[in-house]
Image (cartoon, rainbow, N blue to C red):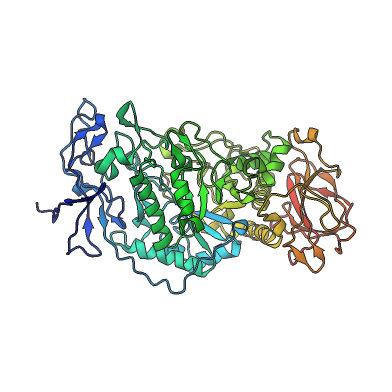
Amino acid sequence: DGSGERTYALNQRTGHIWHGFHPAVRAGQRYGYRAEGRYDPWSGDWFNPAKLLIDPYADTIVGDLVWNDGVFAFERSVSDDFGTANWAESAPMVPRSVVVDHSFDWEDDRSPDVDRADTVIYETHVKGITALHPEIDETLRGTYAGLAQPQVIAHLKSLGVTTVELLPVQRFIDEEFLVDAGLRNYWGYNPVGLAAPETRYATEVESSSAVGELKSLVKAMHSNGLEVVLDVVFNHSGEGGRTGPTLSMRGIDNRTYYRLKPDDLSQYLNYSGTGNTLNLEHPAVMRLVLDSLRRWAVEYRVDGFRFDLATSLGREHGGFSAASRLFAAIYQDPVLCTKKLIAEPWDIGPAGYQLGHFPAEWSEWNDRFRDTVRSFWLGHPRSLGEFAVRMSGSADLFDRPDRGPCASLNFVTCHDGFTLSDLVSHTEKHNEANNELNDDGHNHNLSANFGVEGETRDAAIKRRRARARRNLFATAMLAHGMPMMLGGDELGSSQGGNNNAYPQDNELTWYDWSASRSSDDFVTFVRTVLAIRRRYSCLRPRAFPVAPIPTDDAPYEISWAMADGREINIHDWSQEWPRTLLWLVPPDVRDQSRSGMTRVLIVFNPEANVAEVELPSLSAGDDVSGWHVVLDTAATNGRKHRRLNPRTVIEIAGETMRVLATDPMGLED
């Protein structure tokens, strides 16, 4: 036909699988599928052999999607709504699947295998972190290879994070309405290749280099003691709803791959909010997901997965089940069960909010922690009891025999929402650049601007904002659970108040490394906070405490007190803040030093005024020199060391927190 395409029939069938063999096919071969069958959307069938289809199992996918009427299986210009098939050829407009040789020299690569209790996650975008990095060669900026450069890895290690979580690197497409508006899908939650790496982050986008470059990135991270976790999307595909294009699974077997409405098979069950939901109840689809996970785990050696809209993955017979077949299959898989498994525990379907209900060994994004900590420091009403529960591991959600504090993934910012700087600079979202009339994104941000919306020259406001950043970050990192920070927050990244920057692949979302000098104090603060977390194992418990039985060696468990030293009673817990609180963290038998077992005390003062606080006494058997201030958020870098005697009344500046320990172990100035 002049295009260079040759067609071969897959005329053999085993079970539900059509297959064939061609001896000339080698690594590098580009291909696609065409599927013959009935075109009857009203019955759930969208077969149209004029549409060249992406292999759902493709090793890699090259070429860009060109939006054109030809990529749709129906005639968009016809008014009878999907009934008229579109026989225009789509091959010139769609990407190609590619056969890949996965051989790679891993040498002596080994996963750091960081214990969940010791994990600190750094969520980042492959392109955004290096797109503007002045020390990275311009040809490598925004790529897997750029992220693997020693300058970037050294920065990550210096912070004290253990695990790098990458926003989606599964091959994805830009939605048509974004392309029409001159925008791109930056975040990547619109996949067309579940097991194929995104080529736009490769140095050679029209080749198969993405495979080797992503492996090299993982290898470089591992050699520096850092884990790699992938944010994966298995709840939907980029084919959208019934008005979407036919690019892959819709044209291969729509009724198998997608959840359809029983009373109208032309309509999709849309639990994802993007138009469709993959049908994990079908064995073939579950197998596709499992095979994709194994490819990432085995071929790319990643250390874990964060599952987007994970409630959809556990839906069976319309409802959610922690014992779903997919979760059970992951649990029994000898490779997948060893990986870090993190759920975004909701979708938009019925009873979609499932925080606290995922299986053993899973961690969950805890948005109740996020909202509570934001409220505490930024002046929104919550009860003291809610704050204490979140800080001590969210036992109300995760205190089960098969779970523990590490099931709570604690965060105050992530890719979806305000950055940390914007959180303390805006009370309203500013998403006008997204071309959706500022109707997109969350409205319930629990943020504050301290008197001026956005940028300001007011020195007093800037000081309060900087202090609020320190309070929010330290609280999230030192709470019981698995903490996650948003990449770029340490540099003071701002998106101008845009809290839904998914289509902004530009300087708005790329990290501004030129501002790092002005953020030196906060970078130092981040390092100090994470050093404190590493130093004191009582901040990293693997289990919830049992009912306390006081002894000479362990006189107390978790205890909370008011500023005057009075232990909090039931009435106090129901009170709203601002209230100054003392958290006496229980000692940990793993936390031994020559001077005895270390005690840690955290004082929170969200009030505007200075608070007088009486320090608790220490056990008579403790051979310690008193309390040492190891962190003070009133200081720009967090360091303001002092030694204080027990039972001393001290002053805590307004809107600050202070961490004290009986053994500073090098954390003093």
x, y percent for residue 575: 76, 33
Eyeballing the image, is 627 above or below 424?
below
Picture quadrant of residue 67? top left
Q: Residue at x 65, y 54 (%)?
A: 542
Nearer to me, 71 or 377? 71
Q: Name the spot of residue 490 as percent of width and height, x first.
A: 58, 55
Residue 33, percent across and down?
21, 49
Which quarter of the rendering shows the C terminus? bottom right
Left or right placement of residue 330 versus residue 554 in this view: left
Q: Residue at x 27, y 51 (%)?
A: 55
Report the residue that reaches farthest toward the front. 15
Q: Looking at the image, is 72 positioned above or below residue 618?
A: above
Residue 509 appearing in the image: no
On the image, the x and y values in percent for residue 396 come to 66, 40
Q: Is residue 475 left or right of residue 257?
A: right
Relative depth, front residue between 83 and 63? 83
Residue at point 34% right, 69% down? 103
Question: Horizontally, is 121 left or right of 25 in the view?
Answer: right
Up/down of 463 relative to 321, above or below = below
* Front residue (pair 560, 243): 560
Visible residue check, residue 380: yes
Name the image quarter holding residue 565. Answer: top right
